[in-house]
Image (spheres, rainbow, N blue to C red):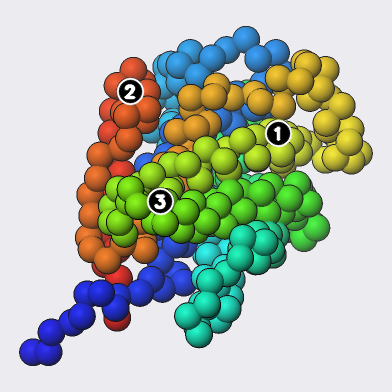
Amino acid sequence: MAQVDKTKRIGRWYFGGIASAMAACCTHPLDLLKVHLQTQQGGKIGLLQMGVRVVKNNGILGLYNGLSASVCRQLTYSMTRFAIYETVKKQLTKDGGVMPFYQKVGVAAIAGASGGFVGTPADLVNVRMQNDIKLPKEERRNYKHAIDGIYRVVRYEGPTKAFNGATMASSRAVLVTVGQLACYDQLKAMLLTSGFFVDNMNLHLTSSTLAGMIATLLTQPLDVMKTRMMNAPPGTYKSIMSCAVEIGKNGPMGFFKVSTNSTHCLSMLHTLQSNLFQLPTVTVVPAVSEFSSYIRNSMPVGWVTAIFENTP
């Protein structure tokens, strides 16, 4: 049997989308709590208290409410943006050239806008399913799964309602993709030229963690607004500005309605798994210290798993 040259293994465009779907399975409890915190107007309940409330009222499985929609969102939103970004990047660098940072940002912005729009229906259903358990039983939508949710939105509220919040979702996706992909590539190149790193696990982990922090910083205000608009009943907000004004009643920090620790962990873990698809081996790695420290005090999940082996 012929030997495979491991140095020539390459990532496929769909690896990132599948890896993101797997990441969603790990981060869903934190994502659900993030949605609950963002949709409360008073802001008096913290992350841990919200988690205790969800488990007390709905059991441990309540933390996974809406998981099918979360996975569906990643298979549309992340698959699209990874496909566009990776395909265009390969075309621009096929002659051995290096993309300047402004090109990476431009490609990432287009990829993010496209992915955000394509993923809006699943994102809307994801937000609704996650927030459903907060509502009185008579007001719950009770979607069976993601496909049922999208079908019912289109049938009973109209096709355009499925794209409610698309502008905000696409805007957020532009920023998160610039932070998650363009900044990741740029940071990785800078670290390689520093002389302190080689192309191995440490490089990928460091680049991914830093890119996740940047993505979080860029997207948090838009993420809060997107969640509010998608979860609101029809006619609640006349425009993006009316949503911003409503959130602004809580002061500037109303746009950062999630604990810094939880948001950082979510972005970091998604970035880690979304980018680990580029590694040339099957890998199981422990989460970095900040995530591990947080998990020890909240949830019994302390490992980031990436199971994709790049093929030639």
**At 61% across and 60% down in the image, what residue appears?**
101
Tell me the SS state at disc 1. helix
Q: Which residue is mark 3?
A: 194
- Label 2, residues with CA under 10 Å away: few <14, some 14-19, many ≥20: few
The residues bearing labels 1 and 3 have C-alpha atoms spaced at a distance of: 33 Å
Q: What amino acid is labelled 2 in the image?
A: Ser
Q: What amino acid is labelled 3 in the image?
A: Ser
Q: Check if mark 2's residue and mark 1's residue have beta carbons within 8 Å.
A: no
Q: What amino acid is labelled 1 in the image?
A: Pro
Q: Check if mark 3's residue and mark 2's residue have beta carbons within 8 Å.
A: no
Tell me the SS state at disc 3. helix
Q: Earlier in the sequence, mark 2 or mark 1?
A: 1
Q: Earlier in the sequence, mark 1 or mark 3?
A: 3
Q: Is residue 93 above or below residue 243?
A: below
Q: Which residue is mark 2?
A: 293
Nearer to the camera, 41 or 128: 41
The residues bearing labels 3 and 2 have C-alpha atoms spaced at a distance of: 29 Å
Q: Is residue 141 left or right of residue 234?
A: left
Q: Earlier in the sequence, mark 3 or mark 2?
A: 3
Tell me the SS state at disc 2. helix
Q: Is residue 24 left or right of residue 276?
A: right
Q: Is residue 68 left or right of residue 115?
A: left
Q: Check if mark 1's residue and mark 3's residue have beta carbons within 8 Å.
A: no
Q: Which residue is mark 1?
A: 221
Nearer to the camera, 129 or 32: 32
Which of the numbered marks, if any, corresponds to residue 49?
none
Split into 4 quadrants, where in the image is the N terminus? bottom left
**At 13% across and 84% down in the image, what residue appears?**
3
Residue 299 in view (yes/no): no
| Coordinates of residue 40 in the picture (x, y in percent) | 67, 21
Q: Is residue 295 above or below residue 142?
A: above
